[in-house]
Amino acid sequence: MQLDHLAIAVADLDAALTFYRDALGLELEGIEAVEQEGVRVAFLPLGDGESRIELVQPTREDTGIVKWMAKHGPGMHHVCLSVPNLESALARLAAHGCELINPQPVTREDGTRYAFIHPRSTFGVLVELYEKPE
Ligand code: ZN
């Protein structure tokens, strides 16, 4: 299991880059619009590039992150851990009574599969699990 990314919700991606890229000095790997989820994401790799910071800006009013930001304001949104086998990780969590936001994994266009665990089960942090394509 490894830290894949920390996602930070921002209202304005370009403004956030003036801190994370320009002032802090992280490298900007790229910016991607994810239509399916109504967000724009900037990827800023850390260290060996296995982990990264993702700045997430909503691009539609009907996305979950808009509701989240209305409640919490901008800030750290979730932690993502990559796992070798998502089904077995979810089965293990379910067996421990954890509340899964996605009991079935969701597949992104790039083939990455993910599922979120509810903060009620994680002591307050939204946790995402990732399984990358082979
Ligand atoms: Zn994520």
Image: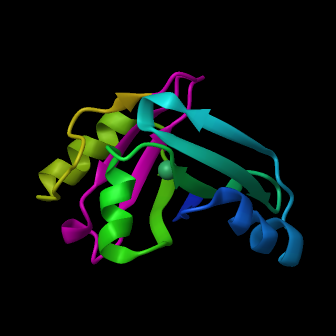
Relative to 20, 103 lies left or right? left
Q: Position of residue 29 (x, y in %)?
A: 81, 47
**28 vs 112: above or below:** below
Q: Position of residue 110 (x, y in %)?
A: 58, 23
Relative to 41, 24 lies left or right? right
Residue 1 seen: no
Which of the 4 image quadrants contains residue 54? bottom right
Chosen colour scheme: rainbow
**46 vs 125: above or below:** above
Relative to 1, 129 lies left or right? left
State the residue at coordinates (35%, 71%).
125
State the residue at coordinates (69%, 67%).
16
State the residue at coordinates (88%, 70%).
22
Per the image, is 123 magenta? Answer: yes
Residue lying at the far front of the rendered structure: 61
Q: Position of residue 77 (x, y in %)?
A: 45, 65
Residue 100 seen: yes
Q: Which residues are magenta?
A: 108-134
Along the viewing direction, whichever of 68 and 60 lies nearer the viewer: 60
Which of the 4 image quadrants contains residue 134? top right
Per the image, is 89 magenta? Answer: no
Q: Position of residue 68 (x, y in %)?
A: 33, 63
Along the viewing direction, whichever of 20 and 94 lies nearer the viewer: 20
Total marks drawn?
0
